[in-house]
C-alpha cells in the first residue's frame, strides 16, 4: 500500500507493509511496517525490498 494519510498509514501498517510518501503532515508516522519514501523512484525501490523480504 502506498499512502500519505496518517490515519490510513497507522491503521494499515498493523496488518501490511505501507509505503509512506513523505509529507509535512505525516512526519509522526513511524513503525515496523512503515517504509518512508521521498520520490516515485524511491517507491519502486521500496516495493523491491518488500518483494524480496516476502520471498525469503
Image (cartoon, helix red, strand yellow):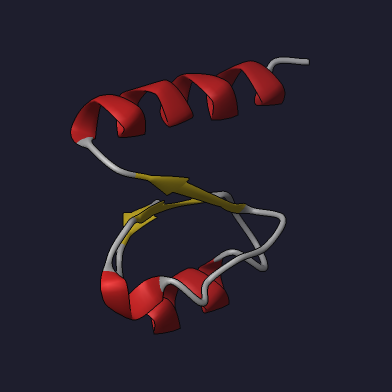
Q: Position of residue 50 (x, y in %)?
A: 57, 29
15 with respect to 46 (left or right) = right
Q: Residue furthest bottom?
A: 7
Q: Position of residue 36 (x, y in %)?
A: 46, 49
Q: Is residue 37 above or below residue 42?
A: below
Q: Position of residue 23 (x, y in %)?
A: 27, 66
The quadrant of the rendering that contains the C terminus is top right
Residue appearing at x 32%, y 57% in the figure? 22
Q: Is residue 40 above or below residue 19?
A: above
Residue appearing at x 57%, y 49% in the figure? 17
Res. 10 image quadrant: bottom right
Residue closest to the eye, 1 or 32: 32
Q: Is residue 36 above or below residue 56?
A: below
Q: Is residue 38 above or below residue 23?
A: above
Residue appearing at x 33%, y 34% in the figure? 43
Residue closest to the eye, 29 or 51: 29
How many numbered tags mark residues here?
0
Residue appearing at x 21%, y 33% in the figure? 40
Q: Position of residue 31 (x, y in %)?
A: 67, 63
7 with respect to 56 (left or right) = left
Amino acid at each position: 500500500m502506498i499512502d500519505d494519510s496518517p490515519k490510513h498509514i497507522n491503521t494499515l501498517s498493523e496488518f501490511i507493509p505501507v509505503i509512506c510518501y513523505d509529507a509535512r503532515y505525516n512526519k509522526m508516522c513511524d513503525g515496523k511496517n512503515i517504509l518512508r519514501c521521498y520520490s516515485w523512484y524511491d517507491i519502486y525501490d521500496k516495493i523491491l525490498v518488500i518483494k524480496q523480504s516476502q520471498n525469503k
